[in-house]
Image (cartoon, rainbow, N blue to C red):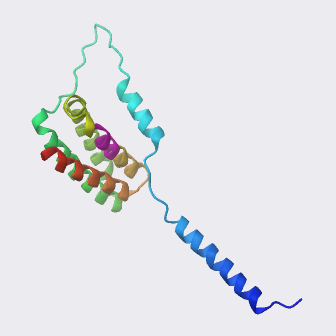
C-alpha cells in the first residue's frame, strides 16, 4: 500500500516531536542532592569526646561582627574556584581547601548567631566541592551567587 501525503506529514510531526523532547530534556536543571546534605549534616552534628589525655584545639571561630566579611571572602573564593575549574588549573584543589577552612571557622558563628544563614552557606560549600570533584565550574558560580545574596542580607 503506497504512503500518502497524510502518512508523510504524520511521520514528520512524530520526528519533530521526538527531536523537541530530546532537546528539551537535555537542558535539565542542576539540583543539590538531599543525601549529600543529610550526610553533611550528620557529619557535622555527630561529636565524639576525645580521650582525657589528648589535647585538641578547636578551630578559631569568627567573631559575629565579621560573619558578613567571612561570607564575602567565601564568595570571592568560589568565584576564583569557578575560574580555576574552567582553566583546569591545579589551584582548584588549593582553593577548595581554603573554602573548607573558611567554612570550618564560619560554621560555629552561623550556628550561634545566624542559624537562618547556615543552610545557604553549607549549600554553597557543597556546590564548591561538587565543582572540583565533577569539574563543573557552574556549581561554584551558583554557590557564589547564593553567597552574594546572603551577604547582602547579612549587611542590611
Residue 127 among those drawn in magenta = no
- The image shows a total of numbered marks equal to 0
In the current view of this chain or complex, which residue is farthest to the front? Answer: 6
Q: Which residues are magenta?
A: 118-125
Write the residue at 15% across / 33% down. Answer: 62
Horizontally, is 101 left or right of 48 in the view? left
Horizontally, is 29 left or right of 71 in the view? right
Write the residue at 59% across / 70% down. Answer: 21
Residue 123 among those drawn in magenta = yes
Observer-nearest of 51 and 17: 17
Give coordinates of residue 56: x percent, y percent.
Answer: 25, 18
Q: On the image, which quarter does residue 69 sit in?
A: top left
Judge whether 90 appears above or below 10 on screen: above
Write the residue at 82% across / 89% down. Answer: 3
In the current view of this chain or complex, which residue is farthest to the left? Answer: 65
Write the residue at 44% across / 55% down. Answer: 30
Give coordinates of residue 41: x percent, y percent.
Answer: 38, 32
- The secondary structure that dominates the magenta segment is helix
User: In which quadrant is the N terminus drawn?
Assistant: bottom right
Observer-nearest of 48 and 133: 48
Give coordinates of residue 34: x percent, y percent.
Answer: 46, 41
Give coordinates of residue 48: x percent, y percent.
Answer: 36, 17
In the current view of this chain or complex, which residue is farthest to the right? Answer: 1
Judge whether 9 appears above or below 91 on screen: below
Judge whether 88 appears above or below 126 on screen: below
Observer-nearest of 18 and 91: 18
Amino acid at each position: 500500500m503506497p504512503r500518502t501525503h497524510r502518512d508523510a506529514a504524520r511521520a514528520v510531526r512524530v520526528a519533530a516531536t521526538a527531536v523537541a523532547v530530546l532537546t528539551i530534556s537535555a537542558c535539565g536543571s542542576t539540583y543539590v542532592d538531599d543525601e549529600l546534605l543529610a550526610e553533611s549534616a550528620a557529619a557535622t552534628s555527630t561529636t565524639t569526646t576525645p580521650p582525657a589525655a589528648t589535647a585538641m584545639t578547636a578551630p578559631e571561630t569568627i567573631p559575629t561582627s565579621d560573619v558578613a566579611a567571612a561570607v564575602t571572602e567565601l564568595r570571592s573564593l568560589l568565584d576564583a574556584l569557578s575560574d580555576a575549574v574552567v582553566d583546569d588549573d591545579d589551584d582548584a584543589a588549593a582553593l577548595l581547601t581554603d573554602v573548607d577552612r573558611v567554612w570550618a571557622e564560619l560554621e560555629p558563628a552561623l550556628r550561634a548567631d545566624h542559624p537562618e544563614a547556615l543552610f545557604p552557606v553549607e549549600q554553597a560549600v557543597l556546590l564548591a566541592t561538587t565543582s572540583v570533584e565533577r569539574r563543573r565550574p557552574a556549581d561554584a558560580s551558583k554557590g557564589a551567587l547564593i553567597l552574594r545574596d546572603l551577604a547582602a542580607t547579612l549587611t542590611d
